Amino acid sequence: MKVLEANRIHKSYGNKFNKQEVLKGLNMRVEKGEFVSIMGASGSGKTTLLNVLSSIDKLSHGSIKIEETEITNMKEKKLAEFRKKHLGFIFQEYNLLDTLTVKENILLPLSITKVSKSEAEQRFKSVVTELGIYEIKDKYPNQISGGQKQRTSAARAFIHEPSIIFADEPTGALDSKSASDLLFKISEFNNKRNTTVVMVTHDPVAASYSHRVIFIQDGQIYTILHRGDQSREMFLKDVMNTQAVLGGVHYER
Amino acid sequence: MNVNQLIYRNLKKNIKNYFLYVFALIFSVALYFAFVTLQYDPSMDETSGSIKGAAAIRSASFLLFAMISIFLLYANTIFIKRRSKEIGLFQLIGMTKNKIFRILTAENFILYFGSVILGIFIGFSISKFILLVLFKITEVKRIATLHFSSEALIQTLIVFSLIYIFIMLMNYIFIKKHYILSLFHVISTTEAKVQKMSWLQMLIGVLGILLITTGYYISSKLFSGSFSTVNELFLTMIFILTSVIIGTYLFYKGSVSFISHLIRKKKNGYLSINEVLSLTSIMFRMKSNALLLTIITTVSALAISFLSLSYISYYSAEKNAQNNVAADFSIPNVQDAEIFKQKLTTNHIQYTEYQIDVIQVNINAEQIIETNLGELGIDPSLMSAPVISDLSIKNIDLAANETLLTGNDTLMFLSLKDAGSIQWIGQNDITPHEYIGFKNEYFISWYFTNGGPAAIVDELVFKQLKNDLNPEIQLPSFTHIGIHITEENDLEQANDIFKALGFNSNNAYDSRLEMMNDWKMNMGFLMFIVSFLGLTFLVTSGCILYFKQMGEGEDEKPNYTILRKLGYTQSDLLKGIRGKQIYNFGIPLIIGLLHSFFAVKSGWFFFGTELWTPMIIVMGIYTALYSIFGMLSVLYYKKVINDSL
């Protein structure tokens, strides 16, 4: 079953005279329960792609459907409604509210959708224990490590059981141990709960955790790699090879 | 792009950003100029002359100056901090600090003196209106004319140039002091770190509330007789002030976050958007602004109290005059009263007249007075008091050994027992008597009572006392002659006659209308000055809170981005912001109102006879004006939220 379907999406910035086209008629499909990575060099348009897919940015033209619902022409209010029900986000800069405790941060998406308190508590417990951050639930974000922050952010993305989770460089600011921990948890969630994950990354190791890697170059899909039955290590090699071919441009950072 | 263009562009950008600053600047210049114009206006002599008003106006204009300069300097610190990144950037591209300073100076010069000139212009045009208001409330019948006073102009220019120099000095020090890197971090260092609630903080929180309530409690007991010596009274007042002010500080420092913490704890992590935006942000931010908020609260409490009190006295002018003059006219001299009555008759003014015989007798009231009068140099066992017979008063009939006191006991700083024995001490005899109670009513004028109580005794006793007079303590007059004008419409004319006879310059003769007008003029004038200062304070403090909110809004912008990504709509966020601003502006307002309420309540009866109406009017107006700034800040937040995604 298709969860996300994007057809000929265009996105350009600037005005009539000074137009910069970032996405040039891109098509993509994501099946339910898939874990997809989007890779590409700096400026290839991967973050823009994620933003338009996740309804944060408006398309110039084209169509995007999430669970068969067309989102391109939705009004701001409906979009917000849509985001809170169907989407979850994990960002490189964690994006936690630093005046809220870990627990309050995680419960935020539930309080918008007005889930009952007891159910919220139950879901909170299960997500948090899976991610191993139960002990820090009453701490503030500036009292915990980067890895813990990102796991908090992940917990917030997972707690309301969205159709798709969008992750923008989730490991970008983490050390390698925390990064692999987090990716392991995300793919575990993906397996267990059958949650769809779309992740933008420049890190081949991170990408190797996914089922499928989409490479973009200059606003278009360059190639797609499927993991199939390969081991993660083998897949990582494939990803790195493809990246090397991809113009030899080194990734950021 | 050369430097001039840079200045021009900065200017254009800044006017949009700081429109409220410019507005506040124009407003304060206008107020100041209008006020100083009044000060130099020749027509002011009539209004202010009676109560050394010139001095009052001069000190008020100094206070105005102090308030405005503190406000402008404070606002400048906020703005220079907000622009620190820009300054750092200039340095990064190789400008010298001196050059940056020159750019800032030039830019400020245009903005500042542009506003000053505009302010002076507006101030001049509203000064007539202000004069009109002053004449209206002091009931001076004159036509307000408009004079452009060059003295006022010069004074205003000097004052504001002085402030400008100070601002530039501050900017200079700021630029000199900071290195490039630190300039990029100035904003973040001013905000307090988010921390977990510690025991110490909870203690501070509880202590703050405790101190404030103690202060309130004691203030309600202040004049109820529990503190009977003047020294005690004074010490108690000092105690109340310190306890409330320190309490307020601790309240902002700890109590607010303590209470929010308790609420959050109860929610167990499950917060609604309103709580996310209001509770959690206030919890941490109020603490770092504790000092500022304490000052704002205390001064606004002072302003509201003074305004309320002066309005109370203005409002109760009529009642006050009634208490002091026990008739429309009181003339304790038979011949003069006769002259006055003849004049009234020739002018066809109908009147009624009554006379009460008044004698002064020494009294030993040691047994019934609880207040320690020794400190005031009064011996409670030998005081003189005016005595009248019960025959002179309708509906009062006393037994031979009974004495009734009349007047207003709260106003006299007296606390009396409900009953007890007293002694009337004549020239030869001492008559023991029973004091049976106090009646809050006035039967004879100030001339006889001197503000103290008047005693009523049985006719027989009165005669006895009259035959046994102590000549040393007697007043020249033994008769209170009260004249009532039958038709209220004639009162004005009768008063003119009273004045034409020159009776108003005789302290012993009183006209109730004249006294009321005097009172209204004095109190009106006072009220006018206080409200002028109060208004300036209101606008400046409102602006400061608004500026603080501007900074907070910018700081919290990333949070709004996150929340909007999570699926909160703009209107959701705006609702939360409204809640937040109700706290941000409401807490200092409510605390200020509460402070002034208790202050006014503890001593209002010295100023007038009506508490609620004038106080509620003053507080209502203050709240309404103050809320404008809250609403403006919500509008600002709306823009920030709109831009955040």
Image (cartoon, rainbow, N blue to C red):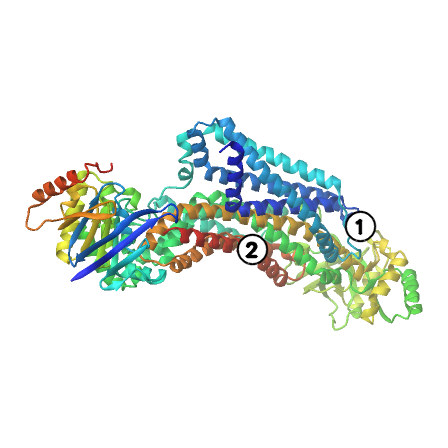
Three-letter code for the amino acid on which mark 1 is drawn: Glu
Quadrant assignment, res B456: bottom right
Three-letter code for the amino acid on which mark 2 is drawn: Phe
Q: Residue at the far front: name it.
A: A17
Residue B575 place in picture, x, y as percent: 41, 59
Q: Residue at the far bottom: name it.
A: B395
Answer with left or right where residue B77 lies relative to residue A219.
right
Residue placed under numbered mark 2 in the picture? B598
Mark 1 falls within which chain? B
Check disc 2 and report its element: helix, strand or loop.
helix
- Does the image show residue B132? yes
Residue B148 place in picture, x, y as percent: 75, 45
Mark 1 neighbour class, 10 Å CA radius: few under 14, some 14 to 19, many 20 or more:
few
**Mark on residue B46?**
1
Q: Nearer the viewer, residue A121 or B131?
A: B131
Answer with left or right where residue B108 lies relative to residue A32.
right
Q: Nearer the viewer, residue B539 or B534?
A: B539
Compared with A41, B464 (above or below) is below
Q: Earlier in the sequence, mark 1 or mark 2?
A: 1
Residue found 59% across the figure and 51% down from its top:
B227
- Does the image show residue A138? no
